[in-house]
Image: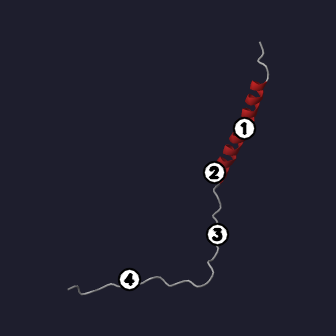
Amino acid sequence: MPAFTFEKISPPVRRGPVAPVEQKQRGVIVQMLDRLVEARARRAARQDKVETAGHDSAAPE
C-alpha cells in the first residue's frame, strides 16, 4: 500500500467578468510583409484587368 495519496484539486470557479485580453503589437517585419503582399495583390489585380481588356478588342495584325 502506498504511503502517500494525491487528490486532484480542481481550479476555482471564476464568477466575475472575463478580463479583456490585450492584443500584442505585431512585429515590424510582419507589418512590412503585409504591405508587400497587399501591393503585389493590387498589382496582380490591375494586371488581370489590363489583360482581360486586351482580349476583348480586336487583335492587331
21 left or right of 9 in image: right
Q: What mark, if any, has residue 45 been given in the picture?
A: 1
Q: Which numbered disc, 2 or 1, marks the residue closer to the eye?
A: 1
Instruction: Kindly indicate the quadrant of the structure image that contains residue 51.
Output: top right
Q: Which residue is mark 4?
A: 8
Q: Using a 10 Å C-alpha cutoff, classify the residue at mark 4 as few (fewer than 14 neighbours), some (14 to 19) or many (20 or more).
A: few
What's the distance in space between the residues labelled 3 and 1, CA to CA? 35 Å
Amino acid, disc 1 = Ala
Quarter of the image with the C terminus is top right
Question: Residue at 64% across / 69% down in the picture?
Answer: 22
Rendered location of residue 38, percent (x, y): 70, 45
Q: Are marks 4 and 1 in contact (CB under 8 Å)?
A: no
18 left or right of 58 in image: left
Of callouts 4 and 3, the N-terminal one: 4
Q: Which numbered disc, 2 or 4, marks the residue closer to the eye?
A: 4
Rendered location of residue 28, percent (x, y): 65, 54
Q: Secondary structure at mark 1?
A: helix
Q: Secondary structure at mark 3?
A: loop
Q: Which residue is mark 2?
A: 29
